[in-house]
Each structure stands twice: as structure tokens, then as C-alpha cells.
Image (cartoon, rainbow, N blue to C red):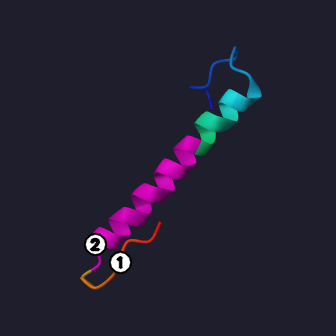
Amino acid sequence: MEKYENNLNWNDVLKLFLDDVIDNCLNEYYQELLSSNDSNKEVIL
């Protein structure tokens, strides 16, 4: 958590943290889709 500066309020910290988490989840999700050989699989968001 050291990349979050102390002068940010908690809403900003939460927003940044959630953005990171969501990005990571989406990246893993898409990597899993891309690595899958099933071409019939649709992207569901």
C-alpha cells in the first residue's frame, strides 16, 4: 500500500485500490479467455 500517498482521503484510496483489483481481475479473465481454445466462448461482462 506504499504507493498510496498519505494526503489522499479514504474515498480516493478505496477507488484506486478497487480500480487495481478490477483491472487485475479483468486481466486474468481475458488471459484465461485468450488462452482457451474454445472459439465458441463469448465474452461476458
Quarter in which the N terminus is drawn: top right
- The structure residue drawn at horizontal position 28% and vertical position 72%, both measured from the top left corner, is 35
Magenta part of the protein: which range? 19-36
Residue at (29, 78) in percent of width and height? 36
Q: Which residue is mark 1?
A: 42
Mark 2 surroundings: few (<14), some (14-19) or many (≥20) residues within 10 A:
few
State the residue in front, 3 or 16. Answer: 16
Question: Crowding at label 1, few (<14), some or many (≥20) Cα neighbours within 10 Å?
Answer: few
Q: CA distance from mark 1 to mark 2?
A: 13 Å
- The picture quadrant where one finds residue 8 is top right
Position of residue 23 in the picture relative to residue 33 (left or right):
right
Q: Nearer the viewer, mark 1 or mark 2?
A: 1
Mark 2 highlights which residue? Answer: 35
At 67% from the left and 30% from the top, the residue drawn is: 13
- Which circle marks residue 7 in the picture? none
Main secondary-structure element of the magenta-colored stretch: helix
Does dot 2 land on a helix, a strand or a loop?
helix
Residue 15 location, x and y as percent?
64, 36
Place residue 39 in its image quadrant: bottom left
Magenta stretch: includes residue 33:
yes
The image position of residue 5, as x and y in percent, is 63, 19
**Where 18 sits versus 37, above or below?**
above
* 29 up-or-down from 23: above or below: below
Which residue type carries mark 2?
A: Ser
Q: Using the image, determine if residue 40 lies above or below residue 8.
A: below
Residue 28 shown in magenta: yes
The secondary element bearing badge 1 is classed as: loop
Name which residue type carries label 1: Glu
